[in-house]
Amino acid sequence: MPRRTATMLASTLVLISLLCVGVILPVPYSEMSPGPTVNTLGEAAGEPVLQISGRRTYPTTGHLNMTTVRVTGADYRMNLVEAVYGWLAHDNVVVPHDTLYPDGKTEEESSQENAEEFSQSQESAKVAALGELDIPVTSRVVVATVVKGSPAEGRLHAGDVIRSVDGAEVKEPGDVAAQVTKRKPGEKVVFTIVPAKEAAAAEKAGKEPTVTQKVVITTAKAKDDDRAIVGIQAGTDHVFPFTIDIKLADVGGPSAGLMFALGIVDKLTPGSLTDGRFVAGTGTIDDKGKVGPIGGIEMKLVGARNAGAQYFLTPAENCAAAASDTPDGLTLIKVDTIADATKSLEKITKGDVKGLPACAKG
């Protein structure tokens, strides 16, 4: 066999071997790519995303789209060829597997965590939206979770409203731990509560609950120090003056908070926040309307532009990354609060786009 032919054959065999190894060899990476966008003013799966009853609503136009990111599952292992392709692809990002699933977290655990964050973001979006409209919302401290095997198990239940601990009024979740830790392990602490069922019935009837119970619990010693504990996690529950339901399946995480809040504001006020334009965005939101950063901003920009968005509401802390690789035709708008977002939308409807707060490259 001529030397040149033999060399080419050997090279081909090596290349084939490398490709086979690349396809078979798993690597510790996962992939992120642009996910679907959903108009919070529109419908998903045949029903409105935002459903409001008990309060006058107004027609809306245009788009206020939340954006998402697709990720490979916790159990999926990319091979070397897929990883290289992902690194070369402009619209995808390959990241270490532990970035998405730290500490060996399973896909089920990750999904549960995302669902909980999504639920919390909906609550905060409602509170922030009504706060922006100066509509009062009642807040109360409740038992969020009860630790299995703890002193509180069977004594307190998720949803119980905590009125006081050892006679001291509870106004914030932190007040509960502050009072309990004044005791020593083995001492008794007295909770004054409204049972969850009574609280739910009163809320449904639009009344303030009046039935209270005193629950005496013997404290235990914390595992990591000498603090007294009872084994609950306190949280905040909100009582809204009318019903706001957010109907959206197969979405997780907290990053849709801002866009949900803006959709609620738009539906509860005359006129249109967008004046028919296509606005997308992202960002967590807290009860006071503060907008927080999110992950996967580059993917969300691509997804928004592919869907037709003209403007993108961008958390201030994500601005530098977003500005470094902005899709053509998409205008970034920096937001710190829901008030910033509504003011920017007002500028857009007036055609004052030069006055929009822009994102600068880092």
Image (spheres, helix red, strand yellow):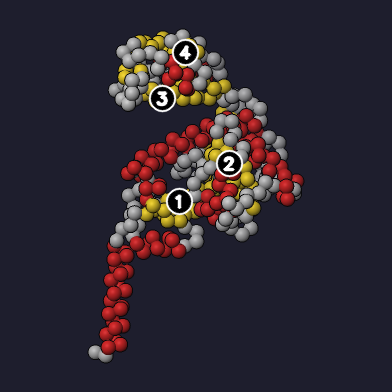
Residue 233 is tagged as 3
Neighbour tally class for label 2: few under 14, some 14-19, many 20 plus, Cα within 10 Å: many
Cα distance, mark 1 to mark 4? Answer: 44 Å
**Residues tagged 1 and 3 counted as in contact (Cβ below 8 A):** no
| Outermost left residue | 1
User: Toward which corner of the image does residue 47 lie, by quadrant?
Assistant: top right
* Residue 80 appears anywhere in the view: yes
| Type of amino acid under label 1 | Arg
| Type of amino acid under label 4 | Ser
Of circles 4 and 2, which is in front?
Answer: 4
Neighbour tally class for label 3: few under 14, some 14-19, many 20 plus, Cα within 10 Å: some
Of callouts 2 and 3, the N-terminal one: 3
Cα distance, mark 2 to mark 1? Answer: 19 Å
Q: In this picture, is 247 found above or below 214? A: below
Q: Position of residue 299 (x, y in %)?
A: 51, 53
Cα distance, mark 4 to mark 2? Answer: 36 Å
Residue occupied by mark 1: 70
| Type of amino acid under label 3 | Gln
Neighbour tally class for label 4: few under 14, some 14-19, many 20 plus, Cα within 10 Å: some
Of callouts 1 and 4, the N-terminal one: 1
Give the SS element for disc 2.
Answer: helix
Of circles 1 and 4, which is in front?
Answer: 4
Of callouts 1 and 3, the N-terminal one: 1
At horizontal 48% and vertical 11% (from top left) the residue drawn is 168
Which of these two is toward me, 160 or 57?
160
Q: In this picture, is 19 found above or below 192? A: below
Residue occupied by mark 4: 164
Cα distance, mark 1 to mark 3? Answer: 32 Å
Give the SS element for disc 4.
Answer: strand
Of circles 2 and 3, which is in front?
Answer: 3
* Residue 40 appears anywhere in the view: no
